[in-house]
Image (tube, helix red, strand yellow):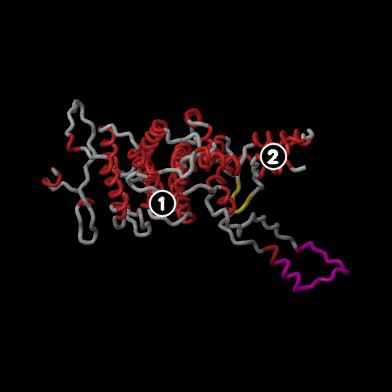
Amino acid sequence: MTRVQTHELSRFEQPRANFQGLVAIKKYRRAAAGRDVWNASEFRPPHVLLRTLKHLFTTVLSWPQSGFNCRKCAQLDEFLAVYHFVNDRVRSIRQDFTVQRIEDVSLVTALQQITRFYLVVRLRSVQLFGGSKAQQDWSDRLNDEQLMSALSQLETLYRMHEFVPESDQDDSERKDAEEFIGYDLLLHADEPQHVAWMLRKHSSKLRSLPMVQRALRTCVALQTDDFNAFFIEFHAMTLLEQAASLRHLVKVWTRSLHMMNKSFGKQDRFSLEELARWMNLADPNNTAVSTIIPPPPPQNDAGRVVESWELINEDLADQVVSRSVAKPSSLGFAQFKHSPVHDQLDLNAVEILLCNVALRIEKNSVQLTTTELIMDDGVDESESSDSNGSDWESIVDEKSPSEVQSEEEEDAPSWDELEKEAQAFDRMRSEKRGPDDEDEDQDYRCTSKEKKMRRR
């Protein structure tokens, strides 16, 4: 109310004729030293905080020329203005949660959306800035700090509320925990100590989930310099997973060039298109360009002697010569050991290459708006959660945990169970059945597996 009276509202808080729905939102205020007294009327309850987040991610991010929902008509100044405004209000929302000591499912829902927002911003910044990222109003480090902080707090809440169940009773909670722990592993893939510490904190049930397993394979590939495996996992990731892995591409490219410099000799050369595919700078599905063999050296016809028995078809000879001399079109060839390889890649070239990769990521992924990515990560509407976080509380299994567990074991038995069944089957074949067994079989309801085992 004070900012309204003093006319200090941002342009993203003042409704316009061509852009309605804007409202004033509480700014972030740093904790001042000695300020122990807080005005209770300044704090917003959890449902209001979630509604504020929804307003930021649906209304404000759709600001014209901001680049969040329409990258083609984006302007850098508008992108930075919208980002700094939303980032400030997001920090204010997190501050209200912290001061009021709210640590329920509403905070979990808020942090999940905030984490996706910073991942989307990371991808958009690479796409929009390209080779002109020397912006005074932008910092990758500050954006990553907010991202890491949200993920760290989110994992603490997962352990506090046991949102990582030991069984598969709640599929929604399992998917959420799987998604965001996978993001954290990908962001720290170049830090083996952090990855090992995370693995010790989480259960084996969680470590076996698909997204976590993919993140762990990516970490292993990066640590062992297996860059072919790294790019295989990279192409299997979702858009936000790839956004989290973009930070490692520079290291992968640098190490790859040093490895190729040691492997190839001066006489080896190959097309730049092939090198681009090796370095994930081109579409891996494009097989039109293959390895180009250097053309043979021109022959000297002065000392050539044609035998009298050799019959030459002039038309066929012209075709053979033209096919041997002509070479496929290529941007050029790559050769190593002709000049030293620098320890670091050129920064401007790196930013341009990262921009190309980021644009290709969005092109090859499912076309979703920024709001869809942030609010539910592109999940189908029947499975997506509402912005008020009610999905955490309204999930009720129709079947009891014992029934669900028994059905899963019947459909997908473990190796230990299969081994026990095989041993029991062998014992049944080796032993003779008594007359009383047939009477017991009539009262015993066998499953389909046991019926097969009892057949002779």
What kind of element bears circle 2?
helix
Between 37 and 385, the residue placed more toward the observer is 385
Between 200 and 415, the residue placed more toward the observer is 415
- Region of the chain picked out in magenta, as a range: 301-321
For discs 1 and 2, the disc positioned in front in the rendered view? 2
Disc number at residue 441? 2
Left or right: where does residue 254 sit relative to residue 18? right
Quarter occupied by residue 292: bottom right
Q: Name the residue tied to disc 1.
A: 127
Residue 205 versus residue 299 in the image, above or below: above
Between 322 and 244, the residue placed more toward the observer is 244
Q: Is the N terminus in the top left, top right, bottom left or bottom right quadrant?
A: top left
Measuring from the top left, give residue 222's x and y in whole percent: 54, 38
Label 1 – label 2 distance at C-alpha: 69 Å
Q: Is residue 305 highlighted in magenta?
A: yes
Q: Amino acid at mark 1?
A: Gln
Between 96 and 315, the residue placed more toward the observer is 96
Measuring from the top left, give residue 217's x and y in whole percent: 56, 39
What kind of element bears circle 1?
helix
Q: Residues within 10 Å of mark 1 (few under 14, many from 20)?
A: many
Measuring from the top left, give residue 99's x and y in whole percent: 25, 32
Q: Residues within 10 Å of mark 2 (few under 14, many from 20)?
A: few
Left or right: where does residue 33 sit relative to residue 63? left
Q: Is the C terminus in the top left, top right, bottom left or bottom right quadrant?
A: top right
Quarter occupied by residue 137: top left
Q: Amino acid at mark 2?
A: Asp
Quarter occupied by residue 154: top left
Residue at position x 88%, y 69% in the image: 309
From this viewpoint, is residue 342 visible? Answer: no
